[in-house]
Image (cartoon, helix red, strand yellow):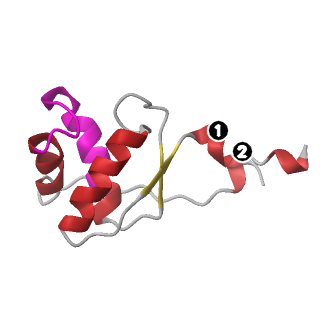
Amino acid sequence: MNCLDIEYEVIQLNDDVVGLALEYIRENVVGQTSYDDCLHIEIATVSRLDLLVSWNFKHIVNIKRIRGYNGINIKNGYPSIEIRSPKDLIDYEND
């Protein structure tokens, strides 16, 4: 499988999707300047995606932050979300 074989869905931001993002900041998972990153996490969570892929190692693909996001998600009745870097999805077995 190469990256062209991966199915994906584009999800649009709407006005209803801000609650968890603000809670991530209130609970100090990340700072106020990471609001856009929090929206990214929240959209994926509220949409109940299985996996979020990002190159943002400071604010998103970071074990401390992933635990924080998932703790808040679970507290609010959402499932935890798996967060990975693109390199985690590369299939080296076919090379």
In the figure, 71 relative to 24: above or below?
below
Q: Which x, y percent locates residue 24?
A: 18, 46
| Amino acid at circle 2 | Ile
Picture disc at residue 90: 2
State the residue in front, 11 or 53. Answer: 53
User: Is residue 12 among what the camera can see?
Assistant: no
**Does residue 63 appear in this view?**
yes
User: Is 30 a magenta residue?
Assistant: yes
Taking the image as shown, residue 93 lies to the left or right of residue 81, namely: right
Relative to 25, is 10 above or below?
below
Task: Bin the neighbour count of mark 2 within 10 Å (Cα to Cα): few under 14, some 14-19, many 20 and up.
Answer: few
Classify 18 as above or below 26.
below
Q: Position of residue 70 (x, y in %)?
A: 31, 57
Could you say whether the residue bearing mark 1 is in a helix, strand or loop? Answer: helix
User: In the rendered image, which quarter contains the N terminus?
Assistant: bottom right
Asked if the stretch drawn in magenta spans residue 48, the answer is: no
Q: Which residues are magenta?
A: 27-43
- Residue at the spot 28% in from the left edge and 51% down from the top edge: 69
Residue visible at 76% across and 49% down? Answer: 2
Q: Residue furthest right?
A: 95
Q: Amino acid at mark 1?
A: Lys
The crowding category of the residue bearing disc 1, from other C-alpha atoms within 10 Å (few below 14, some 14 to 19, many at least 20), is few
- Main SS of residues in magenta: helix
Closest to the observer, 2 or 90: 90
Q: Tell whether 74 sits left or right of 84.
A: left
Could you tell me how far apart the alpha carbons at marks 1 and 2 are, in whole angstroms?
A: 5 Å
Residue at 47%, 39% in the rendered image: 54
The residue lying toward the viewer, choosing from 15 and 36, is 36
- Asked whether the residues under the numbered discs 1 and 2 touch, taking CB atoms below 8 Å apart as contact, a structural biologist would say yes
- Total number of numbered labels? 2
Q: Which residue is mark 1?
A: 87
Name which residue lies at 14% across and 40% down: 25
